[in-house]
């Protein structure tokens, strides 16, 4: 089944590579793509709201960095300890990804992301 997810992630990446930051696949690695998570930058929340209005269920799974979660308080990390991680948690958004997702549905998600950024860029 992970092969199916990889092919779906590859389609997302091929379409979105010039629009948002996509997952980086290191040479020799073989990710399973449990999630397909993009970095939408400061537009993340607005993009999520826009996608929701188009009936696309994009989610924020990691809104709070692990080092700031209660279970890891004993490690002594505080806000600002890992600034890159903390910034990423404010910018990442997971797109729909499941075995039954069709190529047409992926293309629709990508079209809506493109539309969002076109609207955003034209309004600036």
Image (cartoon, helix red, strand yellow):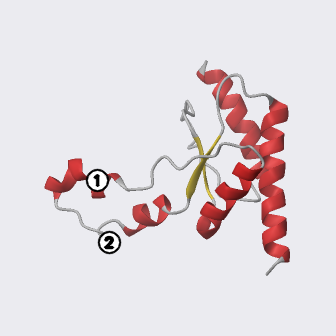
Closer to the chain start, of discs 1 and 2, is 1
Q: Is residue 119 above or below residue 115?
A: below
Residues at marks 1 and 2 touching, judged by CB atoms closer than 8 Å: no
> Mark 1, mark 2: which one is toward the viewer?
1
Using the rendered view, name the quadrant where residue 8 is placed: top right
The residue at the point 77 percent across, 58 percent down is 18
Residue at 24% from the left image edge and 67% from the top image edge: 78
Residue 69: image tag: 1
72 displayed left or right of 10: left
Residue 82 x %, y %: 34, 65
Q: Secondary structure at mark 2?
A: loop
Q: Residues within 10 Å of mark 2 (few under 14, many from 20)?
A: few
Q: Residue at x 57, y 34 (%)?
A: 33
- Residue 38, horizontal then vertical, whole percent: 62, 52
Quadrant (top left, top right, bottom left, bottom right) of the C terminus? bottom right
Distance of mark 1 from mark 2, alpha carbons?
14 Å
Please tell me whether mark 1 sits on a helix, a strand or a loop: loop
Quarter of the image that includes the N terminus: top right
Residue 80 — which label? 2
**Residue 89 at what x, y percent from top left?**
47, 59
Which residue ends up furthest to the top in the rendered image? 1
Task: Count residues near mark 1 (Cα–Cα under 10 Å), then give few for <14, some for 14-19, many for 20+.
Answer: few
Instruction: Name the foreground residue: 66 vs 54.
Output: 54
Task: State the mark number for residue 116.
Answer: none
Q: Position of residue 59 (x, y in %)?
A: 58, 46
């Amino acid at each position: 089944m992970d092969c199916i997810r990889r092919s779906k992630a590859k389609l997302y990446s091929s379409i979105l590579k010039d629009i948002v930051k996509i997952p980086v696949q290191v040479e020799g690695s073989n990710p399973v793509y449990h999630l397909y998570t993009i970095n939408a930058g400061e537009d993340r929340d607005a993009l999520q709201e826009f996608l929701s209005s188009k009936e696309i269920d994009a989610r924020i799974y990691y809104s709070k960095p692990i080092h700031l979660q209660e279970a890891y308080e004993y490690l002594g990390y505080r806000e600002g300890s890992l600034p890159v991680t903390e910034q990423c948690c404010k910018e990442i958004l997971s797109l729909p990804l499941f075995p039954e997702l069709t190529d047409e549905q992926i293309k629709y998600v990508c079209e809506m992301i493109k539309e969002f950024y076109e609207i955003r860029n034209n309004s600036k």
